[in-house]
Image: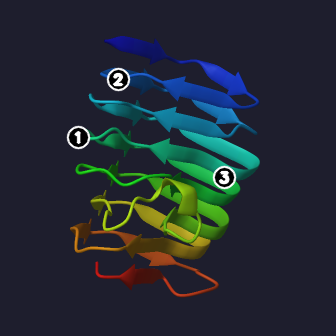
């Protein structure tokens, strides 16, 4: 297990860990590349502050999710972009997305064509999260049916559609 608590990062960060927690960390003007092989990777009470094109690029492992809990994303073009399909996917709970120019959460095979094997997709779970002044809250693409679970989320002030599901979600 790896634990990081209260760290501040400037510039790009590449995390390739499993069974790890990052608590109360700040990523300022940073793009975070988050990878996990098998074993979850959790960001808890972290803030991702721009300006930055994409705040977090998630490459979940084969069987375990990357989690963002109680996190804040602001002043970026994309908050979370998912770079490959897995069985467990991306979990976002109680997080806030503010001033995101494009999509707050995006996973479409057109954006990441080199990482999406044929006939694979990923589970998405977004619960109790708030989206304000975003282009789109969630833009999710799936090549085969996978669960997309969104519950008790609040979306306000989008410049485009609040939710875009592409393919067989």
Report helix, strand or loop for mark 1.
loop
Q: Is residue 33 above or below residue 78?
A: above
Q: Which residue is mark 3?
A: 54
How did the renderer colour the structure? rainbow
Residue 155 percent location from the top left of the image: 45, 75
Residue 36 percent location from the top left of the image: 39, 31
- Tell which circle, 2 or 3, labels the residue nearer the N-terminal end: 2
- Tell which circle, 2 or 1, labels the residue nearer the N-terminal end: 2
What separation in Å lies between label 2 and label 1 (alpha carbons)?
11 Å
Number of on-image labels:
3
Q: Residues within 10 Å of mark 1 (few under 14, many from 20)?
A: some
Q: Which residue is mark 2?
A: 18
Q: Is residue 109 above or below residue 21?
A: below
Of tags 2 and 3, the one toward the viewer is 2
| Residue at 50% across, 35% down | 34
Quarter of the image where one finds residue 140: bottom left
| Residue at 28% across, 41% down | 62
Q: Is residue 105 left or right of residue 73?
A: left
Q: Residues within 10 Å of mark 3 (few under 14, many from 20)?
A: many
Q: Which residue is mark 1?
A: 63
What separation in Å lies between label 2 and label 3 (alpha carbons)?
22 Å
Report helix, strand or loop for mark 2.
loop
Report helix, strand or loop for mark 3.
strand
Residue 138 percent location from the top left of the image: 46, 71
Q: Is residue 103 above or below residue 42?
A: below
Of all residues shown, which one is farthest toward the bottom?
A: 161
Regarding residue 112, the answer to whether it shows in the image is: no
């Amino acid at each position: 297990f790896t634990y990081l608590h209260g760290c501040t990062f400037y510039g790009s960060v590449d995390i390739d860990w499993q069974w790890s927690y990052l608590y109360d960390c700040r990523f300022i003007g940073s793009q975070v590349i988050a990878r996990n092989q098998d074993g979850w990777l959790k960001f808890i009470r972290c803030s991702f502050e721009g300006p930055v094109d994409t705040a977090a690029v998630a490459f979940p492992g084969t069987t375990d999710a990357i989690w963002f809990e109680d996190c804040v994303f602001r002043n970026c073009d994309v908050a979370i972009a998912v770079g490959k399909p897995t069985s467990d996917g991306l979990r976002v709970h109680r997080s806030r997305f503010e001033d995101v120019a494009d999509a707050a959460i995006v996973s479409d095979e057109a954006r990441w064509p080199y990482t999406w094997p044929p006939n694979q997709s990923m589970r998405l779970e977004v619960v109790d999260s708030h989206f304000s002044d975003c282009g789109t809250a969630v833009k999710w693409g799936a090549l085969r049916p996978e669960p997309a679970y969104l519950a008790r989320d609040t979306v306000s002030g989008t410049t485009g559609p609040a939710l875009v599901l592409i393919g067989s979600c």
